[in-house]
Amino acid sequence: MLTLTNIGKTIAGRQILKDVSLTVNDGETLCIVGPSGAGKTTLLRIITGLADFDQGQIQLNQQDFQPSRDNLQQGVIGVVFQDFRLFPHLTTLENVMLAPKLTGLLSADDAQKQATALLTQLGLAQQAEQYPFQLSGGQKQRVSIARALALKPQILCYDEPTSALDPNLRDSVSHLLLQLKQTGMTQIVVTHDLTFAEQIADQTYHLAPLQ
Amino acid sequence: MSWQYFTGIFPALINGTKMTLSIFGLTLLLALPLGLLVSVGLRSRFKPLRALLDFYVWVMRGTPLLLQLIFVFYGLPLIHIVLERYSAALFAFVLNYAAYFAEIFRGGLQSVDQGQIEAAQMLKLKPQQIFMHIILPQVNKKVIPAIGNEVINLVKDSSLVYVIGLGDLLRAGNIAMARDVTLLPLLAVAAIYLLLTAVLTWLLRRAERHYAYYE
């Protein structure tokens, strides 16, 4: 369970977030919705630890949690970036097995087995030896999901998972996220797409731009 | 003009080529890692270090290598640092080329998307792992053409060591020319330089192809 209490953030003298409080329960999918400029991505960066917050408190399983310190060490919260950010010089398989191997979570052999299993689960077995530039947008996204899942995160975050894809792929993304929910994954999804949010959310948090 | 003449001066030219290759190889071996190190320092958040390295790069790129060679060999003894000829040449070449390599690597480092680093951080990779496994392979691909230019330059620049009395390929040719009053030795010298740069060009193309597997 992840709890945010009165989170606030100011960047260059401008308040981006103010008093954001929310709770995501285990196995739940939370959608953070709002227009562009409302601070959705900033909030996601705070949750994943890529940005710091100025006010408030974050707790993970009732324990004080400072993502920029704790998550970068523990990797309990994974993220799927809007632009995927796959490593261009590595194959699909290498992208997925790199982190478990380098962090010592798994041996090289086991990391490869796990990566193969994850890619198969996500329908990417055929693409294991391809490089990111050879993949479609939807495939890149699934590799990015597999790469994050390889570290066995408790929570998986997505930044605008539908925006870099063809509109007709939206349903397949929501299908995929619902599938992951079935496995018990806790998910936080930032999106401006209300229809998409409706398809997948157990809970929706509306973020309005500050004046 | 006879083959006999060429075979006569050949041993001297080969000796000179050995010196040329030795300066070339050792400079490359030492200046590449040093340049990479300097380029990382050039991006440091520690301002005094950055200022110091900026100054170093400015001096090395802003003055002729010939001048630097003279300074190292004839100037440093004035402050009681005495290097023998070969060490002095190597010292000057490494310092000079590391500065050029540093600027090339700096550009390469700058071109790696910050998002790549964030993605790696999110995967719990440590700074060192991010550098070795994510940043460096992408930098290498970008810098090879520019590094290649400098590598070719280095072969020819190595002829500057004559100024502190080292016997390289060009000097061997010059000696034969002055002794025999003919330009023929210089033709042979040119042919050897061309052969060396042809081999290097081929190796550099291979290195480029090695990284051409992805976009």
Image: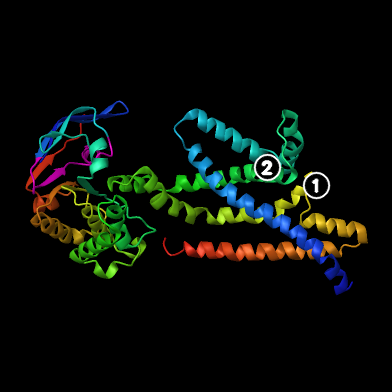
Would you say residue A162 is visible in this rendering?
Answer: no
Secondary structure category for the residue under label 1: loop
Is A197 part of what is drawn in magenta? no
Tag 2 residue: B92
Nearer to the camera, B132 or A158? B132
Question: Is residue B107 rendered to the left or right of residue A54?
Answer: right
Q: How is the image coloured?
A: rainbow
Query: Type of residue at label 1?
Result: Gly
Q: In the rendered image of this protein, does residue A146 appear above or below residue A57?
A: below
- What residue is rendered at 28% in x and 59% in y? A140
Question: Is residue A95 rendered to the left or right of residue B211?
Answer: left
Query: Type of residue at label 2?
Result: Ala
Q: Chain of mark 1?
A: B
Q: Chain of mark 2?
A: B
Image quadrant assignment for residue A31: top left
Tag 1 residue: B165
The quarter of the image holding the N terminus of chain A is: top left
What segment carries the magenta color?
A24-51
Counting from the top left corner in percent of width and height, residue B169 is at 77, 57
Counting from the top left corner in percent of width and height, residue A173 is at 17, 58
Spatial CA distance of label 1 from label 2 is 14 Å
Question: Is residue B154 rendered to the left or right of residue A6?
Answer: right
